[in-house]
Image (spheres, grey):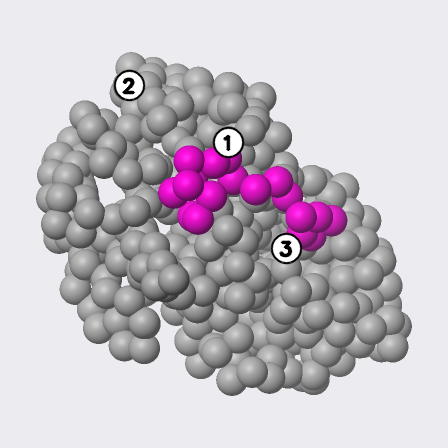
Amino acid sequence: MPDRPAPRVLLFGTRFPPEAAGTAAYARGLGLGLASQGVEVHVLTMGPAVADDGLPFPVRRLRPAAGVLHRYGRCLGALRRELERLRPDCLWTTNGMGTRVAGLLSHLPCPLITSARGSDLRTRLPGRGPWRRLESLALRRAYRRSAGVAAASRGMARLAASRGVEEDRLFVSYPAFDFAWSGGDAGEPGGHGAPASVLTVARLTRQKRVDVVLRAVAAAAARVPGLSCTVVGDGPERGRLERLCGELGLARRVLFVGALRPRSAPLRVEYGRASVFALTSVEEGLGNAYIEAGAFGLPSVGVDGGGTPEVVVHGRTGWLVPADDPGATAEGLLHLLSNPEARRRMGREARLRVEAEFSVEALGRRSAEVVRAVIADRRPPPEDGAAA
């Protein structure tokens, strides 16, 4: 019998590297994973033209549009043309904007897989205000027409179901870490830099609660000589956080390095210098930074809520604490910083977990199964216990 042709998939979303958004990293990892499974991948996205060296699939970029209505119009017209030109076997939208645009299509020429990732479910199902309500109509229409809906985590899947997305269409599609960035060796488990160095990587917004990490560092500093903290990221909270460091007497212990480009050499250096990763954000869909930290052999301190426990396993790959609790966060840091062997053991477990559940290969295997199922007019396969 002749070999069946490789399925052709069009990935569409308005975020893609070099942009730093989590959905941009997800789209790249999804494309790499599907390509590794023999799927013919094409990407349509929005952003300035850049060289996509090393990617095994073409990326077509639309010029950025001024204004939301202009962006919708440009994306809708381009998506229609690309679907007609490529005639893909499946369309997979990788972020909220892409999903809403797909919901505006008058005709779907192939099965549709959409995404439930980030704030869309909270801000648009239901939507508050006239504009959000209009966007929610497009989002709901896209979900109703979907053969599958890719949730960022089990927690996000439960939230989507509670907001009216049909449960049998939902499946979990985790972000992926590309070990090619680390050269296949992501460092000594438990950190090989300073023995008491805490790293946090986040956009500096209120949701990320970096102030909780700083208060925890201040509390732990009395018991850990030489304790230091590096903050990677920028955002509207930076000025307030720098002032807080002064109030807490942390000016010489905390270094703000600003935003670093994803998968860059400077970011790799910061992961390599650290001994513990800490991020106490709330309502986290999953948290790409926990995955990156685990890939570099770092145990994490995170909040016991949202999608974080699907990455950070308490007592195995890190420590989970209540939200907005600097005291408990300090105890988590102290447990890891004062027990080098436990820190190394958890770092090894964290790396093994990323390799098994959050690698490009793992995402590719699961995603290719979903693609082949929906092309054959079947529902996405049930969960296989990933990240349990």
- Of residues 314 and 191, the one drawn nearer to the viewer in this rendering: 314
Q: Which amino acid type is marked by label 2?
A: Leu
Q: Amino acid at mark 1?
A: Arg
- Determine whether 250 is above or below 101 in the image: below
Helix, strand or loop at label 1? It is helix
* In the image: residue 252, left or right of residue 120: right
**Counting residues from the N terminus, which is met first, the one under dot 3 or under dot 1?**
1
| Of marks 1 and 2, the one in the foreground | 1
Q: Position of residue 67 (x, y in %)?
A: 16, 37
Are there few (<14), some (14-19), or many (20+) residues within 10 Å of tag 2?
few
Mark 2 lies on residue: 134
Looking at the image, do the residues carrying marks 1 and 2 touch, with CB atoms under 8 Å apart? no
Look at 26% across and 71% down and name the residue there: 52
**Magenta-colored segment: predominant secondary structure:** loop
Q: Residue furthest top?
A: 130
Quarter of the picture containing the N terminus is: bottom left
What's the magenta region? Answer: 371-388
Residue annotated with mark 1: 169
